[in-house]
Structure formats: C-alpha cells, structure tokens
C-alpha cells in the first residue's frame, strides 16, 4: 500500500512538472504551477510518512505479532504517555548502494527515535524495528540513535533503548561497525550523567550486546529476547557444543546465571508497563534530586511486626524482604536482579514519598554471606545510586564472606573489594540498620560508620564481632573450657553494646521505630554536601 502511494505521488509530481513546462509564462500560470507543485510535494510527504508508519509492511508486522511481539511503534505508544511522542528523522534512509541495497529503502531505516513523557516526565527513546532489515544497524540507523542520545545529554533526561535487532547490517561493512562504536562512546559519556535503560525485546547479538552492557539497567522479555556474542551455530562450529538460543543467551540465563540482565518479564506488554513503573523511581539526570511522590503511608508509622521478626536462634533464617516491605511506603519495593545472587537484595522503594535505594543481606540464602556475585551486584547498584543522588538504606545481617577454594580462586578478595569501594566512595545519604549479625570484614564493608555512614543503627538483636562465638572460642581457647568460654564471649560481643559504646552505631533502636527513624534521617540528610578529593577518576578493583 505504501509503495503504491509512493508511485502514485511520484507520477503526479512528474505530470505537474510536465504541464507547467508547457504552459505560457505569466503570473496566473506561475501561481497555478507553484500551488500544484506544493500539492504534489505534500502528497509525496504523506505517502512517505505512511510508508514509515508501516515499517517493513503489513506482512512482516503480522509475522511479528504471531511471535507474540509488538511492533516498534506499538512499543513506544505503550511506553510513553498517550500523544506525547515527538519523532525524529522519520524520513531518514541509508545510502548504501552495494548488493542491490539502493533499491531497498525504507523511511526510518529500521529504528524509530524521539522523545516523549512517562508520567509527565521527559524521556528519550529509540525503538528498533525488526520488520525493516531485521532491525539491523546501518550508518543512518546509528546516526538516529546518536542524535537522541546527544539531545538527552544536552537537556538532562534518561535514554531508553528498546532493542530488537539482528546486529550489524552486513551490506554496509565497516560503516555499521563504526555506527556501533559511536553509540558505545555515547553510552560511556552518558554514564553517571543521565540514566540509561535497555529493554531487550528480541535478538541482540555480536557487537550490539555491548551497548546494553554499558547502560545502567538491562531488562529482558522471556522466550523472545536473546543476548549473546556468538549464536548457537558459531558455538557449535567452534567448540562443538550443542546449545539453543534460549540456553545460550535467553532471559533465564542472564537473570540467574550470568547476571547480565537485571530483570525479565513475561511479555512485551508487561515489560513496558513495569518499565514505566521503574522509571518513576529515577531522577532525570545527575543534576536532579531523587523524585518525591505524595505519600499517604504515615511517616511515623510504627511497625510492631518487626519486634518479633528476628528468630531467637542466631542460626535460624528469616526473610529480609519482609523487613524491607514492612518499613517502606505501602509495601512497594521494586527489586533489581531478584533471581541472581539471592544472598543480597537490592532495589528501590520510597520512604515518605522519597526514592531510596535498598541494599540488604538475605539470611534465607547462604546465611546472608557475601560472595563474588553478591559483591558485584551490590557494588554496581550502590554506584548507580551515588551517581544519581539516591540515598541508600542498608540492612545488615552478614556472618562474613563466603569461604572456600572456589571463591578464593575466582577472586573474592578483588570482587569483595568492589562493594567496599562503592560504599566508601559514595557521598549520598547512607543509613545503616544492623538487624542481627555483623561479623568480620563484612561488617566493615556493609556501609559501616567507618565508611562514612551517616546514621548507623543496631537493633537489640544485633551482634557486632570479629566472628561468631563458636569460631572465636575455638581459636582463643583451643577447645578448652568451651562452654564457659562461649558464654563469656556471647555476653561480651553477641550484643550491640561493644559497637555502641565506641560510637560505631549511633543508637540502639527498637525495631518498630525503624521506619520513623529512617524518614526523619532522610529529611535532615536531604541537604548533605560531601565531596571526595579531586581526581581524574578512582581505580576501582575491576
């Protein structure tokens, strides 16, 4: 249909030009020809616009729908507020003339770019169109993406990429590779300046994967999205491994095993709706404060359930997520990476309407020990919050770092230092609540007072010590008088007083008052100003 309109408009333009050439030259005829020419140009624009709206054509759109996927335009319309989208470069086309490409052109060239609003707040968006050349990236495609990224930096607004692409456009050779590098450079320049979010809604392979990897958050759609450097066929030919797309780079792989993706959703619609919800937690840029919403949950609400949340036996697990939900506004907690490194919990909630980042040990998994994956997961999140002025509340119940040769051989020392570095470097408001165990070096790492924690609290059930009583007694007394020694050690260290008398915790608080304390502290810390010594950049142990 679009192609037919285009041929018709071209024919009309030629006819008008021929008629005007044969008419006598006078004012009336000149006005007629000018008006006729304008009408033909308008018809041409309309046909091009219609062609752009159809992308690769109705047949390919139907194929996209049969796969359970929305089109690029449908995704933008669902993500952004109705009527808010302003599109850029709708008529852009590639300029490749190799392999017959000069006869294969689509307005927009496989990506839709522009800006709109989410809940009334500005966002820049690009959405790759798999119906046009499989969403492959050309030079023109890359320039469109770079333009919205540049404008986002210019005005200070987040960039959201909806990825659905087969990779580089092979016909363009190095031109498409250069396009990827241009995008990567802007990803790096935007890092820590404006939030960058990637939503993988189809294939994303080869060099294309590095742009999502450079963004702050990567979300996926189950069963229809894939991220991998090389596909199953190449893996088979090079390593003789038989693996499916889903096993190699599906949502389950990247949300549970690799940690590349931060969340996965059941389908396109749910993913886009959850992305709208997630967006509401974020500031627009590093120059904006964390957003504040009207809150109907009383800031001074007492939470009696917390008084009995911690089991009497120190080795008995409990669910730290229940602690978080009980304290935050309206039990609304958006967890990040919920299926990866479950021994640490991270995510966003609100306290008296203010966005807050949460980092918490999870006693239900590996007793809450810190390991390599948990350290990296927590460190990346803390650094994001610090870059965008989001306060962090840390809930501590950690018996230490996970022991064992596997952890040591894979670099727990270096990776554990990342979390320490992230907390120590952060200048945002930092509030810490020790609910139970805070042992060894892990106590220091988890936003302790020594790492410039602003307000550090302990519940009466807190234990701040080098290690647990049994381990300590074995070392100190070498197994002699074990029972008496263990009782003595517990009396001395298995309580919050040793830390409190030294000023390492600011107060020992009743658990039910925790919400009120945090809300009060966030108010007075809202004007906190702290700067690190000037440096080009630090050298975090990567």
Image (spheres, helix red, strand yellow):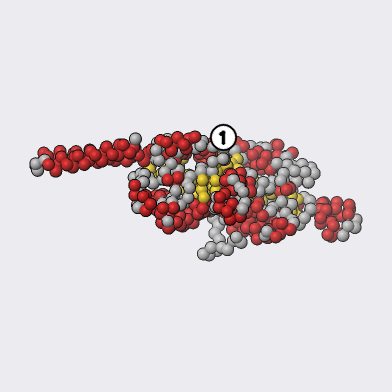
Classify mark 1: residues with Cα within 10 Å, few (<14), some (14-19) or many (20+).
Answer: few
On the picture, is 393 further left or further right than 488? left
- Quarter of the picture containing the N terminus is top left
User: Which residue occupies 56% across, 63% down?
Assistant: 538
User: Which residue occupies 58% across, 63% down?
Assistant: 539
In the image, residue 168 lies at what x, y percent? Answer: 46, 52
Question: In the depicted view, which residue is nearer to us: 223 or 279?
Answer: 223
User: Which residue occupies 23% across, 38% down?
Assistant: 12
On the picture, is 222 further left or further right than 187? right
State the residue position of label 1: 296
User: Which residue occupies 85% across, 51% down?
Assistant: 487
Question: In the depicted view, which residue is nearer to us: 328 or 229?
Answer: 229
Under circle 1, the secondary element is: loop
In the image, residue 148 lies at what x, y percent? Answer: 41, 49
Question: In the depicted view, which residue is nearer to us: 156 or 200?
Answer: 200
On the picture, is 418 further left or further right than 176? right
- Quarter of the picture containing the C terminus is bottom right
In the image, residue 121 lies at what x, y percent? Answer: 45, 42
Q: Is any atom of residue 56 visible in this view?
A: yes
Q: Is any atom of residue 287 visible in this view?
A: no
Q: How many marks?
A: 1
Residue 43, by quadrant, is top left
Question: In the depicted view, which residue is nearer to us: 416 or 423?
Answer: 416
In the displayed structure, 442 sits above or below 130; it is: below
- Farthest residue toward the right? 481
In the image, residue 522 lies at what x, y percent? Answer: 58, 47
């Amino acid at each position: 249909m679009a192609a037919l309109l285009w041929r018709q408009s071209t024919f009309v333009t030629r006819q008008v030009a021929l008629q005007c050439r044969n008419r006598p030259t006078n004012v009336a005829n000149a006005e007629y020809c000018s008006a006729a020419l304008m009408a033909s140009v308008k018809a041409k624009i309309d046909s091009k616009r219609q062609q752009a709206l159809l992308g690769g054509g109705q047949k390919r759109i139907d194929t996209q729908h049969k796969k359970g996927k929305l089109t690029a335009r449908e995704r933008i319309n669902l993500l952004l507020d109705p009527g808010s989208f302003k599109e850029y470069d709708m008529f852009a086309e590639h300029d490749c003339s190799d392999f017959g490409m000069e006869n294969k052109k689509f307005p927009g060239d496989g990506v839709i770019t522009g800006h709109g609003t989410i809940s009334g707040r500005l966002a820049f968006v690009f959405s790759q169109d798999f119906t046009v050349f499989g969403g492959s990236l050309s030079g023109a495609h890359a320039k469109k993406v770079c333009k919205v990224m540049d404008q986002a930096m210019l005005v200070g607004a987040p960039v959201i990429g909806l990825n659905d692409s087969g990779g580089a456009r092979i016909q363009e050779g190095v031109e498409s590779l250069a396009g990827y590098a241009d995008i990567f450079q802007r990803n790096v320049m935007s890092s820590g300046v404006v939030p960058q979010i990637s939503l993988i809604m189809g294939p994303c392979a080869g060099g294309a994967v590095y742009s999502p990897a450079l963004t702050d958050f990567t979300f996926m759609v189950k069963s229809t999205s894939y991220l991998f450097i090389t596909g199953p066929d190449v893996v088979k030919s090079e390593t003789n491994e038989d693996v499916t797309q889903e096993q190699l780079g599906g949502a389950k792989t990247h949300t549970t095993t690799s940690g590349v993706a931060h969340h996965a959703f059941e389908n396109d619609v749910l993913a886009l709706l959850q992305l709208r919800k997630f967006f509401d937690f974020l500031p627009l840029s590093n120059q904006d404060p964390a957003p504040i919403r009207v809150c109907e949950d009383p800031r001074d609400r007492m939470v009696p359930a917390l008084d009995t949340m911690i089991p009497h036996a120190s080795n008995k697990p409990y669910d730290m997520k229940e602690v978080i939900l009980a304290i935050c506004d309206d039990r609304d907690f958006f967890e990040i990476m919920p299926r990866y490194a479950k021994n640490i919990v991270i995510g966003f909630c609100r306290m008296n309407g203010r966005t807050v980042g949460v980092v918490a040990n999870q006693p239900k998994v590996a007793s809450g020990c810190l390991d390599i994956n948990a350290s990296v997961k927590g460190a990346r999140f803390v650094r994001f919050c610090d870059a965008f002025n989001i306060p962090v509340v840390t809930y501590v119940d950690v018996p230490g770092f996970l022991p064992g040769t596997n952890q040591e051989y894979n670099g727990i020392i270096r990776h554990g230092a990342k979390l320490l570095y992230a907390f120590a470097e952060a200048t945002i408001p930092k509030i810490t609540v020790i609910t139970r165990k805070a042992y060894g070096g892990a106590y220091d790492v988890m936003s302790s007072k020594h790492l410039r924690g602003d307000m550090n609290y302990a519940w009466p059930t807190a234990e701040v010590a080098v290690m647990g009583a049994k381990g300590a007694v074995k070392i100190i007394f070498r197994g002699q008088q074990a029972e008496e020694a263990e009782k003595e050690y517990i009396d001395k260290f298995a309580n919050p007083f040793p830390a409190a008398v030294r000023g390492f915790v600011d107060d020992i608080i009743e658990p039910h008052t925790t919400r009120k304390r945090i809300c009060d502290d966030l108010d007075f810390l809202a004007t906190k100003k702290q700067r690190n010594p000037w440096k080009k950049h630090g050298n975090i142990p990567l």
